[in-house]
Image: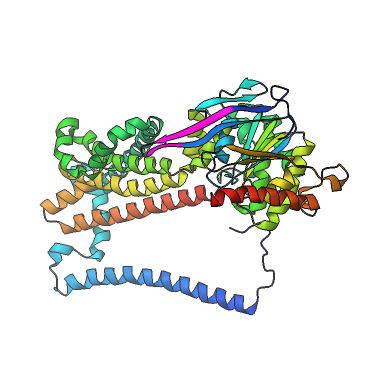
Amino acid sequence: MSGLAIGGAAKVELRRVGLCYFGWEGETEALRDVSFSVAPGEFVAIIGQSGCGKSTLLSLISGILKPTDGAVLLDGKPIAGPNRKVGYMLQQDYLFEWRTILENAVLGAEIQGADMGKARERAAQLLTRYGLGRFLHYLPRQLSGGMRQRVALARTLCTEPDVVLLDEPFAALDSQTRLALADEVAEILRREGKTAILVTHDIGEAVSMAERVIVLSRRPGQLKSDHAIRFASANGGRPTPFAARNTPEFNQYFNTLWQELEVHVEG
Amino acid sequence: MSKVDGVAFANPSLQYRVWLKRERRGRITVRAMQLLVLLAFLVLWEVLPRAHIVNPLLTSYPSALWPTFVQLLKDTPQQASILSHTWATVLATVLGFTAAMMAGTAIAAALWWWSSLYKVLDPYLVVANAMPKTAFVPIFYIWLGATVSIYGMSLAISLFITILMIYSGFQGIDPNKIKLAQTFGASKRQILTKVVLPGSVPTFIAALKVNAGLSLVGVIVGEFQSASLGLGYLIQYGSQIFKMNIVMTAITILAVVSSLMYLAIAWLEAAVMRRR
């Protein structure tokens, strides 16, 4: 377990969170008794088999779902609904095809009633920084998958959240774009000092990007283990996700986590 | 739909030029065949009655239409030029489908907003849509009077299908787009105005296409019953005094009106879809 003091200056904290979905066919327990906390600026990955409640966890932190049991806290206060401090990047870009790239990037600011002049300026800056300066007035269908996902990142960061939730944000991309974009996103989030929570079923992605990896069991999702990821061979510095994949530690972590996940396949 | 990294050919290859040529020739052939079908129809319509293979009293001839049209411009039943008759029909149609689009969208939005309202009303909407609305022509005449009943029929015949089409368009919006808006804290109203309505533009166009034709049907049957103005009235009048020239001229104008409406909607569709 990572040595984060519970009740300290946690950015996000889950206390014995449980969640059930109700339907005519019966109730489904998605999460049971999940507790962990994330320090400010920390990059945490949550891995587990599909259907283990990973995405549900992010929906709870973003405030669009309420827990059936327990509490989710942001800066020590219970989350009552969607919060401006939390940004959420979904599995696909979900850009609105009727809006230009710039109009898509300012969607959050527009919904939150922010100053649109400033929002447009910030969105244009972000998009330019991500190499999309030429395409501000293009439509989404004119862009490739990797470019579109960068627009989605700009849309998330345009509202200046402290916490960024990433729900398998690279799942829809081809493997090269995936590796390149993972590098970019990790670098951007670290530089801006964001607290990040990444949900993925890709062990390599989790180990290479995060400082901490939490493993969830199969449904109902329960906390299985919590690993701090350290790269001693990189002289104390944090290697980029791509470089991290070439370290000896990467393979050790990968194998440990892989075995932990494998147990559930058999069990 | 070219991606930005797509490459345009500055120097088309020989194969490409051959391909282009063949494609162009294909298109021209289709157009030519379309014209040929129309021409064959007109020739048969002209020749068969003249050869007395069919009774000319029943069908009139294409060549008789223009003189009839010119005559109807000045000397017409009800002291109205045929242009006034046409205008009356077009106006009722446009008013009918505009009203159907607006009311249909508003009702569909209400059903989307209160999903339990939809659950309650669903079977009634389906039945109302399946009902032959023309059965209500005499009732509308009694309830609404000669003129308003025509507008009423034009609206009634396209309203329910509009509600059902637009509602199902709203239902078809990707729930993840709505989830995305929710992560920014969007209210229900914002989800409607920023996601559901703009995302349903293709549905609106499809509904408009269906409605333009249906409203015209509603107007014509309405005019059969009650009008003293309009192409439906002219058709009814012409058939009662057995002047097929008048009937066929009115029907030909209807064909032209339908084509123009189709072109207008196709143009609107192209203008809107360029943004997608």
Magenta-drawn stretch, dominant element (helix, strand or loop): strand
**Magenta stretch containing residue A25, yes or no?**
yes
Q: Is residue B193 left or right of residue A124?
A: left
> Which one is nearer the viewer's eye here, B193 or A79?
A79
At 28% from the left and 34% from the top, the residue drawn is B121
> Which one is nearer the viewer's eye here, B223 or A60?
A60
Residue B25 is situated, as x and y percent measured from the top left of the image, at 49, 75
Q: Is residue B150 left or right of residue A210?
A: left
Quadrant for the N terminus of chain B in the image = bottom right
> Is residue A48 placed above or below A10 in the rendered structure?
below
Residue A82 is situated, as x and y percent measured from the top left of the image, at 58, 28
> Which one is nearer the viewer's eye here, A126 or B212?
A126
Residue, far top:
A77
At 20% from the left and 49% from the top, the residue drawn is B234
Residue B259 is situated, as x and y percent measured from the top left of the image, at 36, 55
> Is residue B173 placed above or below A142 in the rendered structure?
above
> Is residue A267 placed above or below A79 in the rendered structure?
below
Examine the rendering and report whether any part of residue A211 can be seen.
yes
* Count of marks placed on residues: 0
Examine the rendering and report whether any part of residue A148 can be seen.
no
At 70% from the left and 57% from the top, the residue drawn is A176
> Which one is nearer the viewer's eye here, A89 or B128?
A89
Q: Which residues are magenta?
A: A16-28
